[in-house]
């Protein structure tokens, strides 16, 4: 009996390692031969924070692929401008002014969207806010705003539209996190907290859907290093070729490409992925050592 149990344990361990090796081979194969990109023609897609920068570029490029856009932004004027840019190119866009930090406003606008346009098949949780200064310099209002927009807004939007996706076992939730959702750095403590939370949402939700056999609903987390705009802090790095600062148009293109391939995690630039994943294996003191070395 003892011998049989030992044999079963050894056999299961061997099977586990064979499966792990096979998954690594599949990942390696897809690195050189990526899967075909799914069509977005006629898909209803919601983009939050669509009024400027990355949100606007995502919206424009998704519309160019034939999608029907639902645009959400706090700034009604810039959001309408994005919608007008889409319509001028022959695309379809519906603009809604909504405060992503307000759960009741999200629920009311979501109800309106379902009545007027339909259920979104893809949701881009892109809206976000950013503050760069020492932790104790943040006011309680600023901290609440960071958490309410970056983290809770993500949760409330996903909560509104996920149910329909689960009922049909089809859909895609995309959340824009950050490299700062992987590693904590100075002067961005509340921001890191919000983005670590977004990473936690995507990981946990993906596992929940997997165990409930809802593989038709995809969950993607996007981890950009830095996307340029006039308000960005420009880091002083020893290896700028590794830590690219992307233009919003380039970042949007790369994100959409990864989403169309149903990638679970998208790093921008892509070359950061092995570095970020490997960094989680290292002790914190070593991560600090390498982090200090990278900064000029």
Image (spheres, rainbow, N blue to C red):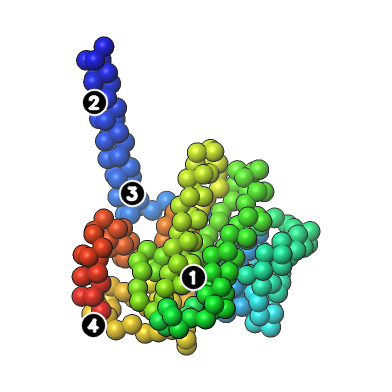
Quadrant location of residue 265? Answer: bottom left
Chain-order first, disc 3 or disc 1: 3
Q: Which residue is mark 2?
A: 10
Label tally: 4
Q: Which residue is mark 4?
A: 296
88 relative to 287 in the view: left or right: right
- Name the residue: 25% across, 79% down: 295
Q: Which sits earlier in the primary sequence, circle 1 or circle 2?
A: 2
Counting residues from the start of the chain, the first of labels 2 and 4 encountered is 2
Residue at x 22%, y 65% (from the top left corner): 285
The answer to whether 141 is drawn above or below residue 224 in the figure is below
State the separation of the CA atoms marked 1 and 2: 47 Å
Left of 286 or right of it: where is 92?
A: right
Q: Is 37 situated left or right of 106 in this image?
A: left
Which is in the foreground here, disc 4 or disc 1? Answer: 4
Q: Name the residue rendered at 48%, 61% in the picture.
A: 197
Q: Which residue is mark 1?
A: 252
Q: Position of residue 37 (x, y in %)?
A: 48, 55
Q: Residues within 10 Å of mark 2 (few under 14, many from 20)?
A: few
Assess disc 1: are there few (<14), some (14-19) or many (≥20) residues with their C-alpha within 10 Å of its C-alpha: many
């Amino acid at each position: 009996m003892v011998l049989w149990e030992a044999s079963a344990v050894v056999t299961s361990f061997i099977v586990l390692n064979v499966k792990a090796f096979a998954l690594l081979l599949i990942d390696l194969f897809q690195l050189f031969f990526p899967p075909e990109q799914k069509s977005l023609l006629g898909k209803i897609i919601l983009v939050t924070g669509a009024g400027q920068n990355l949100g606007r570029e995502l919206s424009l490029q998704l519309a160019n692929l034939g999608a029907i856009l639902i645009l959400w932004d706090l700034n009604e004027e810039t959001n309408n401008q994005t919608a007008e840019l889409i319509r001028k190119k022959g695309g379809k866009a519906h603009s809604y002014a909504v405060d992503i930090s307000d759960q009741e406003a999200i629920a009311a606008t979501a109800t309106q969207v379902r009545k007027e346009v339909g259920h979104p098949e893809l949701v881009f949780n892109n809206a976000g806010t950013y503050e760069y200064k020492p932790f104790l310099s943040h006011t309680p209002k600023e901290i609440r705003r960071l958490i309410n927009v970056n983290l809770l807004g993500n949760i409330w939007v996903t909560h509104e539209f996920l149910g329909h996706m689960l009922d049909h076992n089809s859909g895609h939730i995309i959340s824009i996190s950050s490299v700062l959702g992987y590693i904590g750095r100075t002067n961005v403590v509340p921001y890191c907290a919000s983005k670590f939370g977004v990473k936690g949402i995507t990981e946990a939700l993906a596992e929940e859907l997997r165990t409930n056999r809802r593989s038709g609903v995809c969950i993607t987390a996007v981890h950009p290093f830095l996307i340029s705009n006039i308000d960005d802090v420009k880091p002083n790095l020893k290896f700028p070729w590794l830590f690219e600062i992307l233009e919003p148009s380039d970042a949007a293109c790369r994100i959409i490409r990864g989403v169309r391939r149903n990638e679970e995690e998208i790093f921008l630039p892509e070359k950061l992925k092995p570095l970020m994943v490997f960094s989680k294996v290292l002790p914190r003191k070593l991560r600090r050592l390498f982090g200090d070395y990278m900064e000029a």
